[in-house]
Amino acid sequence: MSTDNTPTTLDGTAFLFPGQGSQAVGMGRAFYDDWPETRAMFDRLDAALDIDLTGLCFDGTAEAIQQPSITQPLLLATGLAVYKGVTARFTVEPTYVAGHSLGHFTALSAAGAMDPAATVQLTHQRGKCMEQAATADGPGTMVAVLLADQDEVTQACATRDDVGVALYNAPRQTVISGTTEGVTSVQETLNEQATTTARFHELDVGAAFHSPVMATAVDCVEQAMGEVTLREAEIPVVSDVSGEIYTEPSVARQDLTNQITSAVDWVRVVEQLRAQGIERFVEFPPTGVLSALVERIAPDADCLTLETPADAREVFA
């Protein structure tokens, strides 16, 4: 730990920020209650919006926080607020940051590339854009495909223009997304052609994210992003779109736009981090989803989850 205000870079360590689907009522509450720095950041982000983030996060319902325009700023606020607490209390920073889908925004803001208040407003608007796209062209559906080879899933999706791979989460764990008809057709193709019997699980997410159904959200999000200043990231970011490492604002802007209709490739993120010598992955709240995926991609990696302040003391003190 550093003895002054200059953070110590934790060699071989990446901080990870989760995306939509990982949310839960009460996420981050222990940090909010115990750490003034976390509480101050969360309250600052709450004040930047016309919705009650604190009430929804800690006393809301699972249904209420599933709405994209609510879920996305909630996830961002939770991750950033805990990150603020960690950096203030332990004076540390990671070698790299990465985020899964919405978590890419959290990672960029944590890395200093975007002002936190502007970012929470952007994610709120991004959620609205996606809700509007789902109403106009969807809602569509998302289905997890288990056991099938990801190349076979990609090829099956390539036969249609209304469905695609949304998430490459882990080996033999992908998610397809698009119109209900398109997703059903791809499932039938996989059942007929896959070398391994695939299993399917429909996700309860309310819209077909990262798919052609979201195409009308692109201009909407681009317009919102045009009002946000992007800076050079102070900590290198691993893109969940390309798997490449970057700090440049132009790359961030392009990635966050491409993300809307393109696949999130978490496998490439983890493989890139491992290639850069990352041995320790620290997952910020809400925890569980990303660490489980990392363990499937890199079984020998050290995965740590920050569920409580006690976890953070054990990891960083």
Image: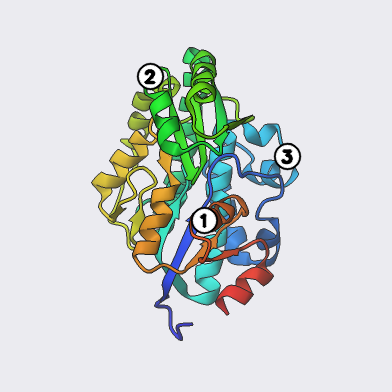
Residue pointed to by mark 2: 159
Secondary element at image label 2 = loop
> Dots 3 and 2: beta carbons under 8 Å?
no
Give the class, few, some or many, for how many residues have Cα within 10 Å of label 1's Cα (few <14, many ≥20): many
Residue pointed to by mark 3: 60
Sequence-first disc among 2 and 1: 2
Q: Residue at x 25, y 52 (%)?
A: 248
Give the class, few, some or many, for how many residues have Cα within 10 Å of label 3's Cα (few <14, many ≥20): some
Distance between mark 3 and mark 2 Cα atoms: 41 Å
Q: Which is closer to the viewer, label 2 or label 1? A: 2
Q: Amino acid at mark 2?
A: Thr
Q: Which is closer to the viewer, label 3 or label 1? A: 1
> Dots 3 and 1: beta carbons under 8 Å?
no
Q: Is residue 122 left or right of residue 286?
A: left
Residue pointed to by mark 1: 294
Sequence-first disc among 3 and 2: 3
Q: Quadrant of the C terminus?
A: bottom right
**Which of the 4 image quarters holds residue 315?**
bottom right
Looking at this view, is 64 or 10 the one in front?
Answer: 10
